[in-house]
Amino acid sequence: MTDQLFQTGSLLWLDVALKSSLLLAVTHLAALLLRRTSAAMQHRVWVLCFAACLFVPVISIAVPGWTLPVVAQSWLNNETASATEVTVQSLMHPPVDVSSLTSDFSLSNAWPRGDESGVAQSLSHEGDRFLSPVLPVTTSGDVRDSAGTTPLATSRSGVATLSNVSWVAVGLVIWTVGVALCLLRTLWQYRSMQRVKRQCMETSQPEWLKLRDDAASAIGLTRAVRLFHCEEARTPMVVGVWRPMILLPRDAENWNTAHRRSVLLHELGHIQRHDVATQLLAGLVCALHWFNPLGWCGLAQMRKLRELACDDLVLACGQPPADYADVLLDVARSYRDHSLAMAVGMARSSNVEHRILAILDRARNHMTLTPRTARLSLLTATALVLLIGSMRLETRANPPAETTIEETSTQLAQATGDTTSQQPKATPANETTRSNAGLPEAVQPVESERRGKRLIQIGTDNLRTNGGISDIAFTPDGQQIAAGQQNGEWPRIHLFDISTGRRANLITVEEGPHGWVRCISISADGTRLLWGEAGGAVALWDLVNDRLLFREKLHRRMVHAVTFAHHKDWFASCGADSVVQVREVTNPSNEIQTIATAVKPDDGGDFVHSTGINCLTFSVDDHHLFAGDPTTGNVLVFNVEKGDLVKQIANPTDKEGISINPLIQSITMSRDGSFLMAAGQRTVKREETSLKYGGKNVSMSEVRLWDPVSGDLIRELYGREDHGFGYAGLSPDGMKVAVGDFSRLRIIDAESGDALQTIELPGWWGSTPEFSPNGELVAVAIQNSIGLFEVQSGNRLHHQSDMPIGWMATAAWSAGGDRIVTSHGDGYLRGWDVETGGVIWSRELAPVVSRSGWNAAACYVKFTSNGRSVVAAGRRDDPVEYRNGFVLVCDAEDGEIVMTTGSREIRNAVLSPDNERLIVATSNGSADDTRFASVQLDTGAVLFSVPPEFVKGAFHSCEAMFIRPDTRVLEAALGDGQVVGLDSLTGEEQHRFTADWLEEGQRFTARGRPKQPRMWEADFSADGKTLVSSANEYVYVWDVETGVMRLRVRHPHDHGCRLAVSPNGKWIATSDLLYSNDYGTNTIRLYDIETGHEVMQVEPDDKRAIVLSFSPDSKKLLAGYDRGSADIWNINP
């Protein structure tokens, strides 16, 4: 009896293992398809997968199922079936006489009488719950075996056979041991956590408690959370499931307020999302399925996604991405691995760069999980686990010729009554645009055939791309330079003419897998262009005939580097999967070598630079490949033909643990092969450097020259002021090295290390320099532009200092419509002549104080009504007092600054009708930390602040502001859907209403909490009586005085749009927001504000508008792009 029960348990174990593996495989596929969605969504998919794995055994036993013949009969037995033995298979289902299958057939009647038959019958029904082997069917004359007896008549031998344990039973024993070991490891971690908790001291400092409460309120967290200071902690972490607590490291007291707020938002995000509990759940599943690599891969992916999801939550609360990236970098510098059960740490050194790049990537989806999406994902997961869990895995057995498998299964199912009931298909509900009687019917506009006409362009597109530049490369003749464009739906490479700076060609592929260009290389003869993509594809382009030759996914994740061999017909690629591929150029499908290095791969997202192999180069004779390991800074040398590791050049950087990653950014072989240049970064304490500003630990560039044969160090080229990430390029003659540090580009002598040329580039965070083939020019990527410099003089080519670099941040027209003022990502304010498109003046908003600082950018610009002055407000770099906001007044004729003052960071502003005051919306980063302040423009004095600084709680982020000239009321549209009216002279609240666009089924979260009608974008009409807002796929028009929705328009793009209302109050201009999983189009649409009908379309040339501004007469529209340029369109309908 015990042996039989053991065998039954073995079958159940096998059934659950197979179904869980199928569930994990389906989830991996789903994760691949959803890789462009937000981290929160991807994390939720994995949480539901692991939860579903725990329910598989219950569903397998309790839920009626359906059959799938997939399990081989031989799997269930390691004994050869014979006529004289009773195997587990025959015990579960003995031969049955087909002739006995009548309407009154019962399974018990088919079993021989005796003591063992009852056991067999019982086991048979239990076995049907999870494994349903097909019955060997015979006729009544064939029931007996060769001895003349039925197989079960010799029941004693049948029971004896069970003592020969099958491999499934052996596997069950091994599995039990593995589970026990995993649980013991978890127990040890739990005890370690308890030891750490006993050494912690709960904080009672009011400033910490206030920040905790503010942060909890910002994300809607109501649970009680305690704060503890812990000497053992080296990074902030969350501990506990039922009574969560946050452990702060010992240096937390040295953090400034913004730093503390960011950390608390992140950690409270873990608590709100129940990440400790989901981590334990996933760990339990992996312990139960310790033999399954799919589970461990999913657990690793889930850990990375939970951090990205909390990072996105912090950004959603209004924290500036650059500031938060600094906080994350500082926390990671002091990270020490704490593998504790029921604990979630903030930063790991192995994935911090991945997270920083994701934080700074504007095109990436940073949205938090909506309740509707959560419900849909839960329903989908429930349906999937019911489908897989109720599946009955049958053994595949060959029946006698008289009866087919299908016939036997049908007959037996009919006889036993064990058929699965057919559920009727659910009829989908008819889609409607009005489930709430209080909302107007949605207008479905018909595309207009009218097109706007471009009048003039301001700015330049020379040496500019849409968005950032990932990599650059000169053609061998030095006549052109190629630039890979970051982010986008398809790979795009821009080829620019060196002599003019104009774009000569755009190389793109708009079919096959999506993915943007990460790295590029051009062959020595100039006929082939090679590139690697973020999704793992490698492509080869024929530059002579301008056509695609090859594009295939050679790597599982991002491709970090591609290169051509010097003499052989080869190219090589490497990526985050730690694999080096060598292929033939003339026949890329021909694999020369695949080298699976021992470097730890990264199975995370697309923005990975901290693991895998991130750079490589061939030796001069092409016999060896040199590859960089970013996790150690070591250079690995491989024999190409054999694929063997020949040697390893060790990075001598100090390994005491201060460095996040002694990253190696690039390796370059000198033309004569006499030395190998390796460039990267090291992290040191700031007091060890000559830097005045920066964090406690700072990144310092380092360049080393190595002997490629012996591996000996030749010389080091770095100093105490080389603050940067370690981007460097080698001149063709090997005599000069160009280093891209923070805020400067240096040309140094490769022999002595002396600086030959220093080019100041304030606010630049560096990129890999590239020398021209003749060594006279050096190029670097600067935001969305190519900086082309003469090596000898340092002069920048094809660049006028008054031409903008970076994206356009905001723009405004003069009252007469003859001038425009703009702010860009390069930190400058510019005045433009509308008639000619020329720059009138250019003025720096605020200096970049620290080497690792950033350029100022205005969120608001406005001409005064008399046209004599320009008012601007926004953010700047202030590493001293951290007052990262500014208000500035300058002369409209020449840009001369008249007044400037600092403040908290300013997110929005509006000028009073009398031009004497500027009302600003300030915030230190949290969504509910917005305060309105009135600034006297002639003196810079603050007249009021609402609410005051000492009052707990503030407004949500401000999306639009306007002061009504007839009532002097400040109307403010907030991100949580509130529209607040304040007295612009005193700050006292006058009225408030909710711009509630939610329908009945959208009003509550999955937990029953009220849902906020979020406002993504907003703008007021010129009289302040009408508000236009955007959320999801709709554009809404509201009456400000009554709070009633007048109109809603169905926009073609599902992920929101930028908005502008014309001064005459008749038109709404929209431009699609750019999301990585839903790119939308470049089309600008104009709608009638009364009817919602589309009246015109504007089609920019390969550019996406991020700024929209009507002229005062409403006949022209300025569309500003991320290239930095702008077009002025005639849109008079």
Image: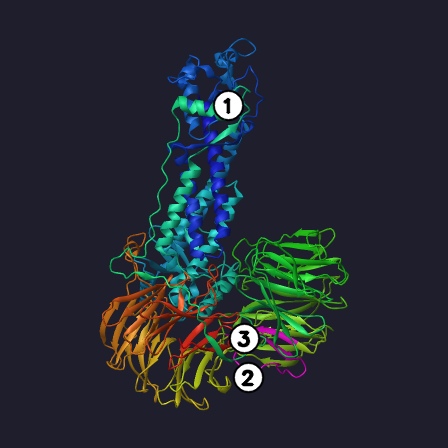
- Which numbered circle lies on residue 801? 2
Whole-angstrom CA distance, mark 3 to mark 1, is 71 Å
The one of 191 and 12 positioned closer to us in this rendering: 12
Residue 751 image offset from top left, x and y in percent: 72, 75
Q: Which residue is mark 1?
A: 89
The spot of residue 10 in percent (x, y) is 48, 30
Q: Amino acid at mark 1?
A: Gln
Disc 1, SS: helix
- Report how far apart the C-alphas of labels 3 and 2 lie in the structure: 15 Å
**Residue 493 figure quarter:** bottom right
Q: Quarter of the image containing the C terminus?
A: bottom left
Residue density around tag 1, few if under 14, some if 14–19, many if 20 or more, within 10 Å: many
Residue 938 image offset from top left, x and y in percent: 34, 89
Residue 930 covered by magenta stretch: no
Tell me which amino acid carries mark 2. Answer: Ser
Comes first in the chain, label 3 or label 2: 3
| Residue 1093 in view in this figure | yes
What secondary structure characterizes most of the magenta part? loop
Task: Examine the rendered structure and indicate whether residue 1077 appears above or below residue 992.
Answer: above
Task: Tell me the SS state at disc 2.
Answer: loop
Q: Amino acid at mark 3?
A: Trp
Asked if the residue at tag 2 contacts the one at tag 3, i.e. Cβ–Cβ closer than 8 Å, the answer is: no
Q: Callout 2 environment at 10 Å: few (<14), some (14 to 19), or many (20+)?
A: few
Q: Position of residue 397 (x, y in %)?
A: 54, 25
Q: Point out the frontmost of discs 3 and 2.
A: 2
Highlighted range, magenta: 778-806
Along the viewing direction, whichever of 637 and 1002 lies nearer the viewer: 1002
Q: Considering the numbered disc 3 on the image, is that residue within a helix, a strand or a loop?
A: loop
Q: Residue at x 27, y 82 (%)?
A: 965
Disc number at residue 764?
3
Furthest toward the front, the residue is 449
Taking 415 as reference, is 402 left or right? right
